[in-house]
Image (cartoon, helix red, strand yellow):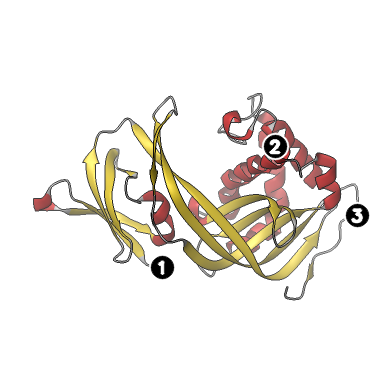
Amino acid sequence: MDNVTIQDVSNPESRKILGEIDRPSAITEVYEGAIYGHQGEQYLVERLDYDDRRAFVKQIDADYYTEADTETEVKILHLDEQQEFANYTAHRGEVHVATLVKAFKKIKFYTRENVGIGAVDLPPEEFETEATALVLRPELVQKLGLKRGGEAACLQGVGQLLQGLVPLFVRVDPGDVKVLAEALQPHFEAPALILYDRIPDGVGLTERIFRVHREILEAAAELLERCRCRSGCPSCVGPQASLGARSKAVARTILRGMLDEREQMLAPHSEAAW
């Protein structure tokens, strides 16, 4: 994978290389206008030469940080394996991932106040990789009312829970696997949680996730029960302001439904290409 070099241009006479960042992460970390942190110091990204794989930064003292606004689309290419459960189906296969950054927010430290926005003009980052998809059954969707806008958005809270727990079960860096929660996944035409390997072509991470995903779901449910917040916080499903006052309650109900084994579980089997 080709990396992007981060070059400090604070002093034109003694430019130095601060480090490197992988190309997929560059569009969300070192776009023009981003605040880049390095060894406790803040740097403003003055320019990203995407084609030449170089980012030019200058040291500053800012009272805010930046957060990229991304849109990610996962297209199912081929499904190789599936396992049926009472209220959802787990799939494993190949996917095409496209991530586009259109803008970024400037967020003030401590207060988390949005103090500005900026545009990002970069091509989408696209690659093929492997993924595990947890697709909710129509019966559970109807029971939970997940077709309604507000309730469906709470699936993102479950996604955030899984995002934080996956590295503990497959022993990877937090950024190596991403979780995308979709209220209506186009391929399955149902709500789904897509856990995909961020390394192009995949390195076997999602196969391991497929094997232990029930343990991850159980850990997520336990974490949610033990969290003392009333309706969501960054330690569990995310702040209430982002997902709504019912985000924690709905996420709890979704996890309970997925873990319900009152119906007989079918054995894993391979499936033909889709």
Local SS, label 3: loop
| Mark 2 in CB contact with mark 3 (< 8 angstroms) | no
Q: Which residue is mark 1?
A: 1
Quadrant showing the N terminus? bottom left
Apparent side of residue 273 relative to residue 140 in the rendered image (left or right): left
Quadrant showing the C terminus? bottom right
How many residues crowd around disc 2 within 10 Å: few (fewer than 14), some, or many (20 or more)?
A: some
- Residue occupying image coordinates x 71% and y 63%: 187
Amino acid at the residue labelled 3: Gln
- Residue occupying image coordinates x 85% and y 42%: 143
- Tag nearer the camera, 2 or 3: 2
- Residue occupying image coordinates x 64% and y 43%: 156
Q: What is the CA distance from the residue labelled 1 to the residue labelled 3?
A: 44 Å
How many residues crowd around disc 3 within 10 Å: few (fewer than 14), some, or many (20 or more)?
A: few
Apparent side of residue 99 relative to residue 87 in the rendered image (left or right): left
Local SS, label 2: helix
Q: Which residue is mark 3?
A: 264
Residue 84 locus on image (x, y percent)? 82, 59
Q: Which residue is mark 2?
A: 150
Residue 188 locus on image (x, y percent)? 74, 60
- Tag nearer the camera, 1 or 2: 2
Residue 168 locus on image (x, y percent)? 58, 48
Q: Along the polypeptide, which appears first: circle 2 or circle 3?
A: 2
Asked if 272 appears above or below 203 in the picture, the reply is below
Amino acid at the residue labelled 1: Met
